[in-house]
Amino acid sequence: MRNDLAGNDGTPAAEQKVDSDPSDERILEGSKGYGTSSSAVREGETESSTSSNDEASSALAGVSPESGSGKEMTGSSKEREKSEKSEKPPALYSEFVRRYINAAIKGNVGAQATLGYFYEIGEHVEVDLRESIRWYEKAASNGHLQATLRLAEIEIAAGNGKAGVSWYEKAAIQGDMDAQAMLGYFYQTGEHVTADLAVAIKWYLAAADQDHIAAQNNLGRLYQIGEGVAKDLDQAIYWYERAAKNGSDAAARNLQKLLP
């Protein structure tokens, strides 16, 4: 779920360019498809809070724990049941998936994130993006970073920029450098947000201090041209050199042009 998907030419996303200007590096928000790896989302806590078996069984059956089977049906309930019977019955859950659902209901954060992944790509269950988002949100609300990042990617891909930025901010606050660099790029370019160079530089610095190469290169560029900061060629060289040392070809080119 990190933003390191390669482009068609094999170039890491962090190294792809902004428009036609070779001096900047675009920080992509992930692919429009499914950028999540199962190993990534399956990380998480194994401890869980307690919950009744009745709740788990009810969720698997598609009913709430409070609804009892012995209650007399109202007219609307009968009509709903008749309508449901006319629909194609849902696929039965395997014991494997049932175990994940039971664990997720009891508060297991890793299970919640994994269910989000299963429903997103259709692994072990039928694809259901709404159910995927529901489980990702539960995991994210419990501090699961990868689920938070995936929600950001999903919302951005769906054209919901405000919601996507909100999830990226949550991930950035947790210290994720990809989310921090992404926010820097958004606030620099005005994509999904109102452009604010002071905020862009704040997030770029947070990511650059963790050796995010695109953030380092873009900081160098801002210092070189004096955009959002006082023009400072020494700072530009400093960030270009760090980015180039970490493998940024764009930073190496920028440095070569700047130095004699």
Image: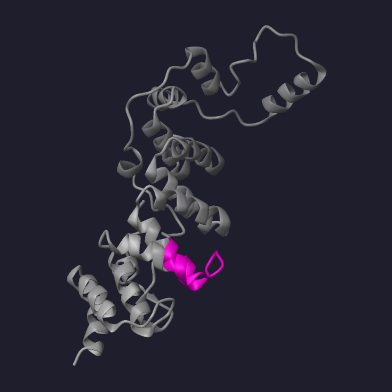
Residue 4 shows in this picture: no
Q: Residue 171 in the image: x percent, y percent? A: 41, 49
Q: Is residue 46 above or below residue 1?
A: above
Please give the name of the residue rendered at 68% of the width and 27% of the height, measured from the top-left corner: 84
Give whichever of 177, 39 is nearer the camera. 177
Q: Residue 74 in the image: x percent, y percent? A: 79, 15
Which contiguous range is marked in magenta? 183-200
**Is 114 within the magenta?**
no
Q: Is residue 25 above or below residue 73?
A: below
Residue 66 shows in this picture: yes
Give whichever of 19, 200 is nearer the camera. 200
Q: Quadrant of residue 214?
A: bottom left
**Is 189 within the magenta?**
yes
Please give the name of the residue rendered at 33% of the width and 61% of the height, measured from the top-left corner: 207
Q: Is residue 33 left or right of residue 128?
A: left
Please give the name of the residue rendered at 73% of the width and 27% of the height, measured from the top-left corner: 83
Give whichever of 234, 105 is nearer the camera. 234
Quadrant containing the C terminus is bottom left
Q: Is residue 2 above or below residue 130?
A: below
Please give the name of the residue rendered at 51% of the width and 58% of the height, measured from the top-left corner: 157
Q: Quadrant of residue 210?
A: bottom left
Q: How is the image coloured?
A: one colour
Q: Quadrant of residue 220?
A: bottom left
